Amino acid sequence: MEACLIWFILGNLTASQFPKLISFDELIMTTALMFLAIFFKRFQAACFALGFNLLFAVVLLTISIPSKHFNLGSDISISGQIITLVKQEKNKIRFDLEVDCISVKAQQKDFICDTSFLLNPKVRLVWYYPKTQLSLGNRVQLSVKLKELTGLHNQAGFNYQKWLFSKNYLATGYIKQLLKVEDIPNSRANYFSRFLAEYESYPHKGFMLGLLLGNRDYISAPEWQVLTRTGTGHLLAISGLHLGLVFGWSWLVFKVMVRPLSLLLKINLESSLLLLALSSTWFFAYFTGLATPSIRAGIFISIFVVSIYLKLNLSWRLKYFLAMAMILTIDPLASLSISFWLSFYAAAVVLGLVWFLRQWQFKSTGLVRYLYYFLIFQAVLFITLLPVQIAFFSHIPLVSFFANTIAIPAVSFIILPVLLLSALCLSLSSYLSIFLADIASYVLTILYQYLSWLSHIKWAYVAVPNNFIFEISVVLLVLLLFVIAYILNSNRKVFVSILVGYSSIFLVYVLGEKPTWQIDVMDVGQGLAIVISHNGQAVVYDTGDAFNTGFNLFEAAVEPSLKAQGLKLVAVITSHADKDHAGGLEYIQANYPSTKIWFPEQHCQNLEQNLIGLSWQVLWPTAQALLNKNQISKNNLSCVLRVSKFGKSVLLTGDIEADTEAKLVNLHSDELISNAFLVPHHGSKTSSQQLFIDSISPTYAIISRGKDNRFGHPHLSVVEKLNASEIRILDTAVHGQIRFQFTAKQAPKLSYYNQSAFIPWHSKIFRGDL
């Protein structure tokens, strides 16, 4: 049985990393192969096929097949139920809707359900300037415009598209009109409103709501930064730790309550207590929204409890794989989530450590013994999670041991239990509920001050560059091969062959010609952000957009790329003041105080000509243009730069339009020639005149824009001009992050995110080339 579970898990993992989303016909074929394996009693192969098929069946039923009926990109009418708490933002609200039918009609009186589904798909919606208050549980009929799942496609940073797939979303979109709403009372929404009102005055209400309800919308960006730098973000996810605590505290409370009855009747109620505690645990998971991590933890606890209750003699290893297989059966797309693998990795470490400590007899007893155990657990988890932190997040929170050693006991034994008591008392005594919330808030404030102090230590948080990860991986692989060679064959020739072979590979890597300088055009949606790097230093030209929620594209896309490459940010140049180009300035000022910034109003004047060892030519605006800047639009005052070294160059144009292009041709016709150029204003029809393009004489044209943007960029006329000039178009909405590497002797080397055929299906850019 254990082998079959492992093969089932491997089948799911293979499907989650498969480079192609299989069709319904291919699913039928692989299902037939599964039954063929069963017929020939190849049960492990059948289990593998079952795991593989189950994931793709869910994708086809909830995403692929329904999307054919949704007419993405056009106005449609849908009906369904709001299944998440409604998030209030400035001038808009967000929520998730479980869709049960679609109508081709747009008017309420004509709403007829044309299409229903076997498994109801989910859509994530935003409503700008809402006119009606909506809440969790409401049934609504809406006129919406939906678009396919997409995210930023960069080599580092959060993979939003993969996350959307992992949560079974069909599409995202916005509401054009509310056609009908049916108000269905929802106890969770009511309690959330009461908690929000009660905790409004507390300094860290976001943490309190996160711990109690699993809602993290009210945690500020600085608070998240403290959690990230100290490795304590897991405390805000309703997962194994929280449900384990609820189970433990519930069991203890029930044990105290029924002890007199047990003594009076002389019966053993231990097994019943376990089921009562398990019921309380699942109620807490339901109350907090049944988030995927809480379901995962609930199933894990349930398997252990049921095996004890039924007196099943199952090994811990079997329980572990059974829990993983059950979760992947209930939610096959859970394997797309990093948290899934982190949870089970941590669980494996904990179970292994428990087994080890059972063999190790401590001389100490009582509280001292448990303190030893706790410190050993924290140390082992810190060390064993280091490779995972580096592989998934490219950073190490070095203070996480010291942070979690204090934070976990504080949350486990004071903050969370007191908050739960406060919630239980809310309906009984408002005074007592507030008193308990005050205690939790007081302890939470002290804890946050401690974590904040740790996060500001200079060495608290270390970014790990990708090249370092590669070098460590090569060394570990060589060591592994030595061990295998020693086990299989102790002949010295084997050792020498491995050493010579890998030394040759490593020397080619180390001694090969490295890029002398590099340009990365980041995928930041409808906006612009470019990283120019040389000798470990970087200059950023434009920062991408920023939003009222605090989310900004520099932090989401540019900063992860800088950290992954081990680059030091020495300067930022903003082409002009538009938010989609300069939105990240506030974040940069707060987090990179020593970085030189050329602000929009400076118009890149006095730019160092040899910044980071490259040649920088400021071609526009001229001194005369700046004298008349009140008569020139912001776009036409964009900073135009030509960056070059060793005869290779790239022209950066901002959002200039036809007038400025003509002036550049008149003033700098010989200096415009470049290997590649940034198509002005994201490919707007007001830019990219033929004479300007001819003057540059580029091999590549780069367009930075958002997919399905409302401006219609790039305009068809611009695309036709570039194609007619036989210039290769590179588009961030098609190719993702675009990289040029320049060396002294070779031609420019081009690479881009969507180039590899081995990108998993959920992370591919689902769109055609220009």
Image (cartoon, helix red, strand yellow):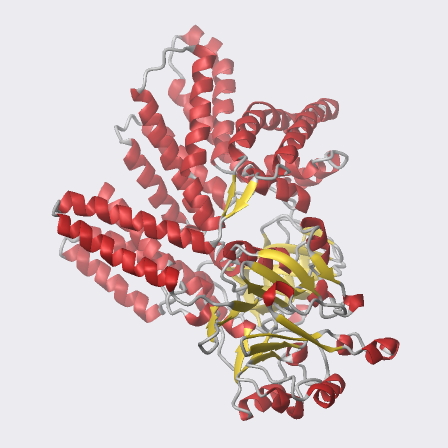
Quarter of the image for the N terminus: give it: top left
Please state the total of marks drawn on the protein image: 0
How far from the left and from the top, in percent, is residue 166? 47, 55
Q: Residue at x 59, y 77 (%)?
A: 650
- Residue in the foreground of this view, choosing between 327 and 534: 534
Question: Viewed as shown, does residue 566 lie left or right of 173?
Answer: left
- Residue in the foreground of this view, choosing between 719 and 459: 459
How far from the left and from the top, in percent, is residue 583? 71, 61
Q: Residue at x 63, y 43 (%)?
A: 224
- Name above or below for residue 91 compared with residue 481: below
How far from the left and from the top, in percent, is residue 636? 77, 79
Question: Viewed as shown, does residue 416 lie left or right of 250?
Answer: right
Q: Quadrant of residue 508?
A: bottom left
- Residue in the foreground of this view, choosing between 379 and 599: 599
- Name above or below for residue 623 compared with residue 435: below
Q: Quadrant of residue 509?
A: bottom left
Question: In the rendered image, is residue 473 in sight?
Answer: yes
Q: Residue at x 56, y 42 (%)?
A: 461
How far from the left and from the top, in percent, is residue 505? 30, 60
Q: Residue at x 23, y 49 (%)?
A: 481
Q: Quadrant of residue 228?
A: top right
- Name above or below for residue 282 compared with residue 636: above
Question: In the rendered image, is residue 737 in sight?
Answer: no
- Name above or below for residue 223 compared with residue 583: above
